[in-house]
Each structure stands twice: as structure tokens, then as C-alpha cells.
Image (spheres, rainbow, N blue to C red):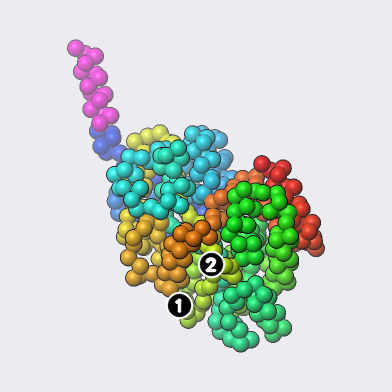
Amino acid sequence: MKSVLLSSAAALFALASTANAQPTAEVLHYWTSGGEAKAVQALKKDFEAKGGKWIDAPVAGGGGDAQAAVLRARVLSGDPPAAVQIKGVNIRDWAEAGALADLSAVANKYHWDDILPKQLQDIVKYEGHYVAVPVNVHRVDWIWANPKVLAKVDAKVPTTWEEFNQVAEKLKAAGIIPLAHGGQPWQDGTVFETVVLGIGGPDFYKKAFVDLDPEALNSDTMVKVFDEMRKIRGYVDPDFPGRDWNLATAMVMRGEAAMQIMGDWAKGEFLAAGKVPGKDFICASTPSDKGYILNSDSFAMFKVKGDDLVQGQQLLASLILGEKFQETFNLLKGSVPARMGMDQSKFDSCAVKSMNDMKETAKNGSLVGSMAHEIVQSGAVRGAILDVVTEHFNSDMSSKEAAKKLAENVALAQ
Ligand code: GAL
């Protein structure tokens, strides 16, 4: 009799503690710049408004390489954060390692299959189950230009790489920095992949970065890409090494430089500073034959113990694809919603262009996943590509040598 009483008391206690557990989530992310911080604050506010306890775990460092090291250490020490902002093939890699919680229950309850485009479903599902929730779509292949600076040399935003070089030469001759840039591998890789798309086209891009085809990596086309990278190296200022991406954006904002090649998280910086698209800055896709380089941020829920943490993960996952949140977050972040069928009326011309171009390029096959931002490659292979690109950008390495090294190093990294 006593044991029955004891076990029912324990059950009651467990029930009570579950009922009283406050949904809690430690959230690891790297959104620490102006626009990024405002966007992540919106998620925190929404989560807390629903009774959640948010434990912020920011790791500064654009592009996320610094955060990736922290995440590996945390998981290896058996203490993973509950929710982590990760992307692309990293999600597959962590799922393969058995580290991610299954989000099927939340996904079914909120019909994610009906509201997410196939491109994003492919990124956040592992073996048919949702293991992460996408929060946005960031386009990578953008030029951000200051129209007042371009006007000084009577130039328009370039639509071909030849025009880009001509405009840059005119700016340089006028003593104006043509391209604001931060010399960090992920930023060099961001510029590089837009040139690969522009000069080689989407099929070449996929052969190089998805198939890792050595014939494409060490080809005359790739030599032409490195030729253009050599020209671009001549258009940045002497203080570019190590500069954070958002400081380069600020140079364009202040009119110290004419353009920046960066994903539309840069728009989040312009907007956070109260700048108006079309007036204070112009967005234009980098020269390509109507391609689109997709990046998308997601939150993956790592396997954790404790009702409060599991409930925190479920609460967070249930919020992220809500229509109101999708609008609030993406307006601040500079990205466009992951959720399909959203009302576009609050979004500016850059965002509407991104949404329309994404739809069109998905249909005609010229939508590609970012290599620099770990959608199609991560780890050693991405590292091998970025190393060659950065070494070439910061040396007098010939284009032929760079293309040859690219194919060799990628082969070694697989
Ligand atoms: C990207 C990320 C964006 C933005 C950018 C700069 O990889 O997807 O959300 O944060 O890095 O940090």
C-alpha cells in the first residue's frame, strides 16, 4: 500500500514540476551587429511574452565561424545549448551525429510542410524529419551602393563585371574607395561566390561548389573568376584586412566608399541607422545572368534534458514561423520570410525584389545555395575554398595557380 502511495506521490510531484516548469532556452547565436541585434531582440521579446525564459548566448563574429568553435566545444563537453542558430549542411552534419531533437510534433501542429518552400525544407529536414526551423532567407549576391558617391563620377550601379571595373576605375581616379570590404575569409568567400555565379553562371557554380568537380574548380572559367578577384583586390582600401562586415557597410553609409558586395544583412544595418532604400542606399544584384545565391538562418534544437528546456525548445520552434514574427524579424534583419504566402506590403523594394527573384530563379534553376555561408558546403571543404581565395586575395598568386590550388585543396579536404 505504502509503495503505491509513494509512487503516486512521485507521479504527482513530477506532474506538478512539469506543469510549473518555465519554458527555458539558452540560445547560441552570432547576431551582435546593429541590425542583427535588433532582430534577435524581437525573437527574445516574443519568446518572453509567451512566458519563456531566454538565456542569451551571443558569440560575436560575423559569418559564424567563431560561434561554430564554441558550439563544438559545448557539445563535446556534453553541455549543448538548447537552441542554436546554424545553417545549411551544418544542420545535416549535427543531425547525422545524433545531436538534434526531432521537431516533428511542432512541425505537424503548425503545418510546416504547407508553409515552407522545398528549398528550405531540404535544409532543415533530416531523413524526412524536421530537426531545425528556418527563420529567413538572406540573399548573398547584392551590391549596396551610395548613390551620392556614384553621382560624383556620374556612374550608375554596374550591371556587368566589366561595368563594375569601369565604375571602380573612375571612382579610384577620383580618389574615392570603390569597394568597402572586410578582409576575413568568409567575406572574401562572399565576394568570390558572387563572381563565380556572375562569370561562370549557375550550372558552373553548382559544378564547382556542389559537385566539387575538379574540372570546374581548375578551369579557364575559374581562372577568369580569379582574374576578376585580382581586379577587385585593387578596389579596396589599405585598411581592409580584418575589418568587420558591418564596419564596411558603415563606410558606404557615410559616403567613404561607393559600394559593398554583401548579403542583405547589410540592409539591416542601413535600416537600423534610419537610412532609406532608394534614397540613402541602392540595392542591386551583383552582375549575373539572373542568378540568386540563397542563404538561410535556422534554429536547431539540440538534445537536452529537463522539462523546462524541452518546453523552451518547443515554444521557440512554435513561434519562429508565425506570420507576425516572420514579418517583424525579417523587416529588422534585412532578410525575407522563410514562410511562403506572406503579405509583402510592409517590405521595401529590395526585399520584394529578393522574394520575386527567389521565386523566378527557383523555377528556372538559377537559384543556388551559398558556399561561403554554409548552405552547400561547410567544414573542411568550405575551409579549403576560403583558404585559397583569401591567400590569392592577399598575395600576388596568379589566377592559374589559384585555380590549380583550389582543385587540389578541395580534393584533399573531402
Ligand atoms: C551570415 C548569417 C547572417 C548574418 C551574416 C553576418 O552567415 O546567415 O544572418 O548574420 O552571417 O554575420
Q: Which image quadrant is residue 392 in?
A: bottom right
Magenta stretch: residue 4 in it?
yes
Q: Secondary structure at mark 1?
A: loop
Determine which residue is flagged by label 2: 290
Label placed on residue 361 = none
Residue 88 percent coordinates (x, y)? 51, 49
Residue plotted at (31% across, 60% down): 324
x%, y% of residue 116?
38, 52
Residue 253 point in image, percent of width and height: 55, 76
Coordinates of residue 178 in the picture (x, y in percent): 65, 76
Tell whether 352 sits left or right of 196. left
Q: Quadrant of the N terminus?
A: top left
Residue marked by disc 1? 276
Pick whichever, 215 or 292, lies toward us. 215
If the image is split into quadrants, where does the C terminus sit?
top right
Residue range corresponding to the magenta coloring: 1-15
> Which residue is drawn at the image coordinates 37% and 34% (left, top)?
306
Q: Residue at x 49, y 69 (%)?
A: 267
Queried whether the magenta region covers residue 280, the answer comes back as no
Q: Is residue 408 visible?
A: yes
Identify the amino acid type marked 1: Val
Which one is earlier in the sequence, the residue at label 1 or at label 2? 1
